[in-house]
Amino acid sequence: MQRREFLKSSLVASAAVLGSTALSAGETTQPIDGRKVSKMAFPEKKPLITYSDRPPLLESPRSVFTQGLTPNDEFFVRWHLPEIPLHNDPDNYTIKVNGLVEKELEISLKELKTEFEQVEVTAVLQCGGNSRSAFHPIAGGIQWGSGAMGCAKWKGVRLRDVLNRAGMKKEAHFIGFNGKDNAAYYETPNFVREIETHELDDHVILAYEMNGEDLPYLNGYPLRLVMPGYYSDSWVKMLSNITVTDKYKSLFFMDVAYRIPDNECECEEPDNKFKPTKPITHMNVKSVIGYPENGMKVYHNSHLVVRGVAFDDGTGIRDVMISTDEGKTWEKALLKQGNGRYSYTEFRYAFKPNKYGKLSFMAKAINRLGEEQPFAKDIKWNHGGYKYNGIDVVTVEVV
Ligand SMILES: Nc1nc2c(c(=O)[nH]1)N[C@H]1C(S)=C(S)[C@@H](COP(=O)(O)O)O[C@H]1N2
Ligand SMILES: [Mo]
């Protein structure tokens, strides 16, 4: 083969390679919607979208997001390990506080409820992988729609008060939390999360009540960590241990899962993953339309009220904008707030459909810092499928 010909053919080959890279570059669209709820229900739960029953993985359907507080029996459920205890006796339930503390403690549920100040906070609990099904190619993990979230009024005691009783030593830098669920195989560690001591503020609580009732069993009965503004991988359920350390311990869930690229865009390419990574922490601004739902038929000239919820990490929602023309023009929705800055902001927008055929509603939340949801196509890909917050779209048919 002559040299010139060789150059030509290698050029063709590299063009083909470039072409395929461009095609496989990570894309995002709308999360998959409209999955059916199961016929079966778990104890204390209504039938929900069910991905697995061991461990239980349950998603709330879209219609739940018309309410500012998510009912306990419609609240999503996520466990990582197949072995969750099948029984917890509240009279004998204790948690241990150990590690770099002056005095190790073993506190019973009863002592928590009677010896510490009781506090309440309304806060959104959202899995970092909520809406993961929007990522292409598929990001590893459960292919959630947008129902791996909920908002509840949590009651409990301040983590700080409990740690103060034990007395953290000066070298304390990390606080680890362990749940009572166990791995089925010894290689898999227990579910453990660590936070840095500076992340500990007065809103972080050990909660035993949710919306005025005991926690539902599957949501962590009888005690869980509540970290308002943070993705819920750090909200450890069925808490058993609080361990104070000076060094970051290499534990699976902190080291592998729930991490994103540690770069400006928090993004990477499917065939060129970025290192180093960092844990997901604060939630970005997001909204989800609860009504109407995709595929609904609505009447021409009827009085339609679009409803949904918006939230962020506690910065606070300033506006929710609605578009009925694919994002060309936007109008403000009416907001209802009042449960504090970590809770859902409810929104509503009245509209009279005056054209037959397909009609799309888009919802875009903007927070007090001016941060807003991007269009789905502008969300950048990451291999774990975390932090999706694309503008929500619901398409109905006007008949
Ligand atoms: N003990 C324990 N706590 C846990 C988990 C777990 O697997 N075990 N999963 C975490 C993750 S990733 C999420 S999204 C939330 C889900 O909380 P929920 O089941 O109350 O909705 O719990 C967190 N706390
Ligand atoms: Mo999660």
Image (cartoon, rainbow, N blue to C red):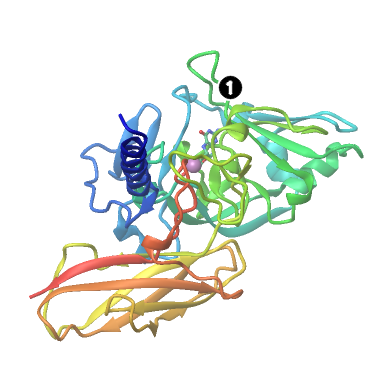
Residue where numbered disc 1 is placed = 189
Q: x, y percentage for residue 147?
A: 37, 52
Q: Is residue 356 above or below residue 95?
A: below
Please identify the residue farthest to the front as the structure is shown: 2
Question: Of 323 and 7, which appears nearest the observer?
Answer: 7
Q: x, y percentage for residue 369?
A: 61, 74
Report the amino acid beneath label 1. Pro
Horizontal side of residue 202 vs 92, given as left or right: right
Horizontal side of residue 359 vs 65, given as left or right: left
Q: x, y percentage for residue 62?
A: 31, 57
Quarter holding residue 368? bottom right
Q: Is residue 79 above or below residue 312?
A: above
Q: Residue at x 59, y 28 (%)?
A: 252
Q: Is residue 298 above or below residue 70?
A: below
Question: Of 361 and 382, which appears nearest the observer?
Answer: 382
Q: Residue at x 42, y 57 (%)?
A: 70
Q: Residue at x 48, y 47 (%)?
A: 386
Q: x, y percentage for residue 33?
A: 26, 53
**Quadrant where the image shows the C terminus:** bottom left
- SS type, badge 1: loop
Horizontal side of residue 131 vs 197, given as left or right: left
